[in-house]
Amino acid sequence: MFEIMPFGYRRVSAYNPFRELEEMSRSFWEDTNITAFRTDICEKDGSYILDAELPGFKKEDISIDLDKDCLTIRAEHKSEQTEEENNSYVRRERFYGTYTRSFNVKGIDTDAITAAYNDGVLTLTMPKKAPEVPASRRLEIQ
């Protein structure tokens, strides 16, 4: 199970008495706070099932790349506003950008991974590799 834990998901922070003021200032001025998309991973019938919440994305905006033992899910919102449009927003909370998460898939049969996208949820079915049993052999005595 620990083979498919996401990379870089820990946050270590020291005590900062001004943290709340800094966060309030950051949220007021920057207001582009994006978090990584959420995933659930469960084990079922010799496979891991990964469900990733990606609401509002089109299937064409999602890419899944596999590089050795690293599976990367990338989803990108593109701004569809043209130069002719002159919208005067009072507040704009929808963010256009890229979301990326990477997972270690060591111990997964990467050739048999399947993906489906339905109702804003990307589902990856990742079968486990069959455990390698060392071949038995007889040693000659010399």
Image (cartoon, rainbow, N blue to C red):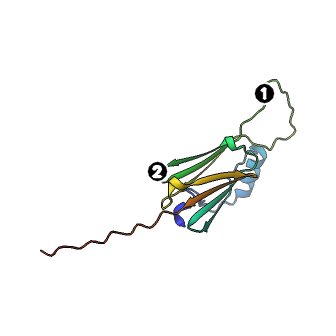
Q: Residues within 10 Å of mark 2 (few under 14, many from 20)?
A: few
Eye-nearest disc, 1 or 2:
2
| Residue kind at label 1, given as amino acid type | Thr
**What residue is shown with label 2?**
68
Q: Residues within 10 Å of mark 1 (few under 14, many from 20)?
A: few
Q: Which residue is farthest left?
A: 142
**What residue is shown with label 1?**
82
Image quarter in which the N terminus is found? bottom right
| Residue kind at label 2, given as amino acid type | Lys
Tell which of 55 and 82 is nearer to you: 55
Using the rendered image of the protein, determine whether residue 141 is visible from the camera's viewpoint.
yes
Query: Tag on residue 98?
Result: none
Tell which of 24 and 91 is nearer to you: 91
Q: Say if 23 sits above or below 142 in the image.
A: above
The location of residue 124, given as percent across then percent down, is 62, 56
Using the rendered image of the protein, determine whether residue 98 is visible from the camera's viewpoint.
no
Q: Say if 50 sits above or below 135 in the image.
A: above
First in sequence: mark 1 vs mark 2: 2
The location of residue 120, given as percent across then percent down, is 74, 51
Secondary structure at badge 1 equals: loop
Q: Which residue is farthest top?
A: 84
Secondary structure at badge 2 equals: loop
Tell which of 25 and 73 is nearer to you: 73
> Residue drawn at (59%, 63%), measured in percent from left and top?
48
> Residue drawn at (68%, 41%), measured in percent from left and top?
61
Label 1 and label 2: CA atoms lie apart by 40 Å
Tell which of 113 and 82 is nearer to you: 113
The location of residue 83, given as percent across then percent down, is 78, 25
Image quarter in which the C terminus is found? bottom left
Residues at circles 1 and 2 in contact by the CB criterion of under 8 Å: no
The location of residue 99, given as percent across then percent down, is 65, 46
Q: Which residue is farthest bottom?
A: 141
